[in-house]
Image (cartoon, rainbow, N blue to C red):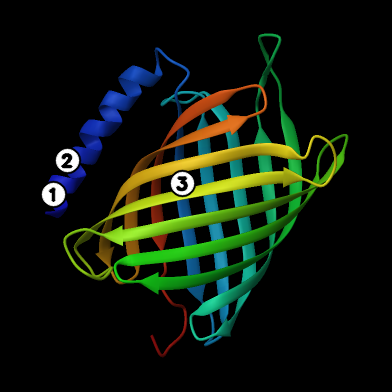
């Protein structure tokens, strides 16, 4: 099962690379770590390498980290974090470089209804841009639905979908909306991988992204 899934992913990446070179389709390669450091505390760490295409035309490098606290057992997590964002957009055909420092606060709560694993994420961001300061609110509603098992157990395939809206505190209020769908595989109790597609809608443009994500929940505590 694992080999078949990896083969499908490799084939998908090859098709994506061929197609993305000829289109406006971008590719995001992402790592997410959420590691317990005590019964209540967790260490969040992530790296996202975002390209204009499937190859090496870097659009954005995002590094985020933070410390979270569970208000209830393994749920209702509040977190304070920092993000470093290097962006390389094209302006009038010329590649430019921008650096952003970001502080963020977030609250995540999880629910379960049957096979549906539901996540709500509320995030407030203070964005220190090179020539500006902005504040932004984000709300994400996500679902993970196991396919070949009733629970998200090892060797389980699952579907993943989310919608996330971004709102500025000043004008224009609407920043963007992201809609995502993916197929995932639970490698073991601490690791899973996803391959999917995200459509990002902004005021003046609409762009698709292929996404490959790896999730690591290995605990750093002695009891796990």
Q: Residue 222 versus residue 39: which sits nearer the camera? A: 39
Pointer 2: what residue? 7
Q: Secondary structure at mark 2?
A: helix
Quadrant in which the N terminus is drawn: bottom left
Q: Position of residue 55 (x, y in %)?
A: 42, 25
Callout 3: 10 Å neighbours few (<14), some, many (20+)?
some
> Between disc 3 and disc 2, whose residue precedes?
2
Residues at circles 2 and 1 in contact by the CB criterion of under 8 Å: yes
Q: Position of residue 51 (x, y in %)?
A: 51, 29
Residue located 56% across and 54% down the image: 140
Residue located 40% across and 50% down the image: 161
The extreme front residue here reads 113
71 is higher (above) or lower (below) than 63: below
Q: CA distance from mark 3 to mark 2?
A: 19 Å
Per the rendering, the mark at residue 3 is 1
User: Is residue 73 shown left or right of residue 197?
Assistant: right
Q: Position of residue 155 (x, y in %)?
A: 19, 63
Pointer 3: what residue? 30
Q: CA distance from mark 3 to mark 1?
A: 21 Å
The extreme bottom residue here reads 223
Residues at circles 3 and 1 in contact by the CB criterion of under 8 Å: no
Residue located 71% across and 27% down the image: 97
Q: Position of residue 175 (x, y in %)?
A: 70, 37
Per the rendering, the mark at residue 150 is none
> Between disc 3 and disc 1, whose residue precedes?
1
User: Is residue 209 shown left or right of residue 127?
Assistant: left
């Amino acid at each position: 099962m694992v080999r078949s899934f990896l083969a499908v992913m490799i084939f998908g990446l090859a098709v994506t690379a061929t197609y993305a070179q000829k289109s406006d389709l971008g590719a995001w390669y992402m790592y997410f770590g959420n590691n317990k450091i005590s019964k209540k505390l967790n260490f969040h760490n992530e790296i996202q390498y975002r390209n204009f295409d499937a190859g090496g035309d870097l659009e954005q490098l995002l590094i985020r980290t933070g410390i979270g606290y569970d208000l209830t057992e393994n749920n209702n997590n509040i977190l304070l974090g920092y993000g470093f964002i290097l962006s390389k957009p094209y302006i009038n055909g010329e590649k430019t470089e921008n650096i952003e420092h970001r502080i963020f606060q977030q609250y995540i709560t999880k629910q379960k209804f049957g096979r549906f694993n539901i996540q709500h994420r509320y995030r407030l961001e203070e964005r220190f841009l090179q020539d500006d300061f902005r504040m932004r609110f984000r709300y994400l509603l996500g679902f993970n639905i196991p396919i070949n098992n009733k629970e998200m157990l090892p060797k389980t395939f699952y579907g993943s979908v989310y919608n996330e809206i971004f709102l500025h505190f000043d004008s224009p209020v609407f920043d963007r909306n992201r809609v995502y769908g993916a197929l995932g595989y639970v490698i073991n109790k601490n690791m899973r991988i996803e391959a999917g597609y995200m459509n990002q809608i902004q005021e003046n443009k609409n762009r698709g992204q292929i996404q490959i994500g790896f999730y690591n929940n290995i605990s750093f505590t002695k009891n796990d």
